[in-house]
Image: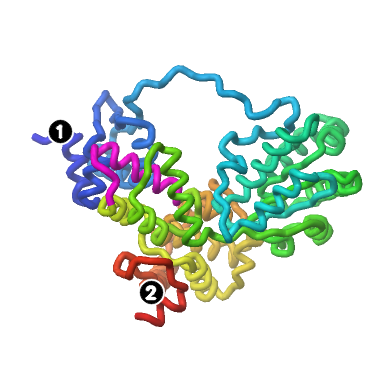
Amino acid sequence: MPSLSEKIKDYLRERLPESAFRVWIRPLRLEEEGSRVRLVFPNTFSKEWVEENYGRLLAEALECLAPEKEAEWVVEEETPAPVQLALPYEPARVLGRRLSPRFTFEEFVVGDCNRLAYRVCRRVVEDPRGQIVYLTAESGLGKSHLSQALGHALLKEKEGLRLCYLTARDFTTRLMQALRGGQMEEFKERLWRGCDVLVLDEIHQIPPRDFTQGELALALDHLYEEEKAVVFTSLRRPHELSHLDSSLRSRLSAGVIVRINPPDYETRKNIIRRKAARQGYRLPEEVVEFLARRLRGDIRRIESAVVGLIARASLLREPVTLQLARELVAEIAPPEGPDRTEIIIQAVCRAFHIDPEELRSSSRKKRISEPRQVAMFFLRKFTSKSLAAIGERFNRDHATVVYALQAVERKLVSSDRFRYRLEYLEKELRESLRLEEDLEDRPEGPEETPGAALSGR
């Protein structure tokens, strides 16, 4: 009689491409221990990859074949002894969050898509006094990398300079703690007079509360008056942040507003080469070109694919080949044109008769919250965006997206009318998204514009 491990693997084999099963599931070891099933992975990367890409399918297999057992995900490899890393700066000179040691100017790949933003940040390092910079971009395009790289360079080149690096949520949390603890004066002292440069990440996540926005406005007034440098990052430009007070939006618009665009073909190739070199590999040029054509937009996604490809080759004890790259892309990047997200959002808005900007607003009215949840549901279904990236699209956090997905699933079961409406909408979306065909069948070379691609069909 087959063991539970064999049953689960057979279940997954029937539902996964053979290449995916061979690389990620076959090395997995399943051990029964009383009421638990231990999923033992050969290394941390393998565990994270399977959890992200096949976690739902594994949960489904366990629910079907061993509903009474609880799963435990573990890594077999030994944990190395902790090593004290060299600090890239003096902690006493940094208020707020610690800067990531990976986010430096040296690690930033410059291309036509981000050259202006890079130069603006370099200029702030040369002369920070009175500089106000607002970096805007979609998630994963490097705005936080640039803002932290600027911080690293300032701390290295400007002796005695004090930097305050906070996310919008950090600012809100610390403000509320100071208010409850009766420490508002100490909070203002540290923020207003305790730093020379303020880096405020994800400013779009400042909540729509008068007190929070008012205190931020007062802090900015003081910093501007003292000619201190302030750097913002955001998913949207100031005038698009409709949940913010107009006076705060005006203050955010006081400096240079620079947009970072998705990486172009040549920049993507450079990112792929750089990431592979960091892993100790030199990828064949045909592999670099293939990945650059197929993986667009989010830089994190591109870098993750490179790491995944190298890990796949290592696990299989094979060289990195074009065929191996095709297998990986088929799993992680279903055909997805650059406007797929907008196609979904526009279709949802037409179906529910609302404006796209309303989806990004702070409104919790049912006529807006329900289509917002539906849009999140279809973005998760038809794109490879992470939960965090989907949330950022609507100025929401990861937990809100999880709640939205669960709410839609519940309503699909409880409401026939809602289910019929979404079935019709899904059919419409599938028809629209069929235009975004697999690029593998097109001639190799620099990418085409969407218009050129359609006219050649």
Name the disc covering residue 435, or none.
2
Q: Is any part of residue 219 visible from this angle? A: no
Give above or below for 251 relative to 453.
Answer: above
Image quarter of the C terminus? bottom left
Q: Is residue 119 magenta?
A: no
Residue type highlighted by circle 1:
Ser
Sequence-earlier tag: 1 or 2: 1
Color scheme of the displayed model:
rainbow
**What number is the disc on residue 426?**
none
- Residue 45 image point, x, y percent: 38, 36
> Measuring 23% from the left and 45% from the top, which residue is drawn there?
21
Identify the residue under disc 1. 3
Left or right: where does residue 175 sit relative to residue 441?
right
Residue at x 45% of width, y 44% of height: 275
Quick one: which residue is furthest to the right in this view?
Answer: 225
Amino acid type assigned to the residue bearing label 2 in the image: Leu
Instruction: Identify the residue at image location x=74%, y=49%.
Output: 123
User: Who is closer to the viewer here, 168 or 80?
Assistant: 80
- Give the Cα separation between the discs numbered 1 and 2: 45 Å
Residue range in magenta is 302-321
Quarter of the figure with residue 5: top left
Residue 94: x and y, percent?
Answer: 73, 31
Q: Nearer the viewer, mark 1 or mark 2?
A: 2
> 441 above or below 139?
below
What secondary structure is the stretch in magenta mostly built from? helix
